[in-house]
Amino acid sequence: MIYADRMSNLGTETAFEVLAKARKLEAEGKSIIHLEIGEPDFPTPENICEAAIASIRAGDTHYTPSAGIPEMRNCIAKYINKTRGIEVHPDEVVMTPGAKPIMFFTILALVNEGDEVIYPNPGFPIYESMINFVGGKAIPLQLKEEMGFAFDVEDLKKLITPKTKMVIINTPQNPTGGILTESEIRQIADVLKDHPDIIILSDEIYSRLIFKGDHFSITQIPGFKERTIILDGFSKTYAMTGWRAGYGVMNIDLAAKISKLMTNSNSCTNTVVQKACIEAYEGPQDSVEKMKEEFMIRRDIIVEGLNSIKGFSCIVPNGAFYAFPNISKTGYTSKKLSDHILYNGGVASLAGTAFGAFGEGYLRFSYANSRENIQEAIKRIKEII
């Protein structure tokens, strides 16, 4: 079979590859502690599940509008208005099966062959994968440990050229757990205001998982809502990773284009899932706060533990549920150390290079696992380092 040339440009998400390796080892009888996959280990809240069951019983099992049912789009518009303080019309919302399609569709709709897209590195690998897939040029913007894994706006300035079509920002960040403060985002906006044709994709999927300060979106700065796509969803906040529920907020013209891409690919997002998501936003929020509190406890355990391992150095992450220790003093490369602790220690993690070239010298650990398992993982790593 002869494949289209573009398929050679398509990357992957290494977390799922490592998960497969870890599952294979488990099938062979080896004990594995999973700190590689980025999903909450909590159950979806009961009220959300009950809303889905009620929806099934009500017969909500048919096609819906490609951009989402009106109640869902209205619900999201109200939520964004409340959490970001900006006016959003339901027609500016597109519901998708998971948040990844918003990355894919916006890049597909906006980036021509040869266009440059600046993206955070180390960063979520699908950014680079999608840019390359559509024939764009991926321009990495280094996140710096000494800045809390923010980036230097002077570096951003230097990377902007007449071919720059889009800038991707992510806060809180995967894989570093870093956040961009309001001050830092305003500095980014000061740079981009002189380039009005550059579009911003703002990945805010972890916006409810911030441990220090409040979430601030670049859309809250006058003039930026119209040129920004907010990417958000339900997977991380409500432990709904397997439900596949995400959305984008963007100007009406772009929303119509993204809706057309939905029509041509997925047709629509599952109706039952949409009804469950409405309950997620409009129902009780105590489960979100409890999950966040538990993540903070786990964060402190894993950071203290990692810093006690010879050759490891880990700053305190202020968001998401990832620790990103510097392991350069161990003498290992990221990939070799990740493999070593998996095969010889029974702890699954991700090499920093899974998130780009600037991830060399780091590992990513997801602390979406129990306190006991995190402590056992630290013990195992110590024994083999």
Image (cartoon, grey):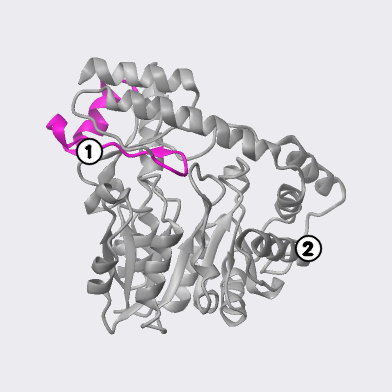
Mark 2 secondary-structure assignment? helix
Residue 329, horizontal then vertical, whole percent: 14, 33
Mark 1 secondary-structure assignment? helix
Residue 200, located in which quarter of the rendered image?
bottom left
Residue lying at 41% horizontally and 84% vertically, measured from the top left: 197
Q: Residues within 10 Å of mark 2 (few under 14, many from 20)?
A: few
Residue 303, horizontal then vertical, whole percent: 36, 30
**Dot 2 amino acid type:** Glu
Residue 168, horizontal then vertical, whole percent: 40, 65
Q: Earlier in the sequence, mark 1 or mark 2?
A: 2
Inspect the magenta stretch and tell me whether residue 384 lies in it: no
Magenta-colored span: 317-346
Q: Are marks 1 and 2 in contact (CB under 8 Å)?
A: no
Residue lying at 30% horizontally and 47% vertically, measured from the top left: 354
Write down the residue under mark 2. Answer: 71
Write down the residue under mark 1. Answer: 335
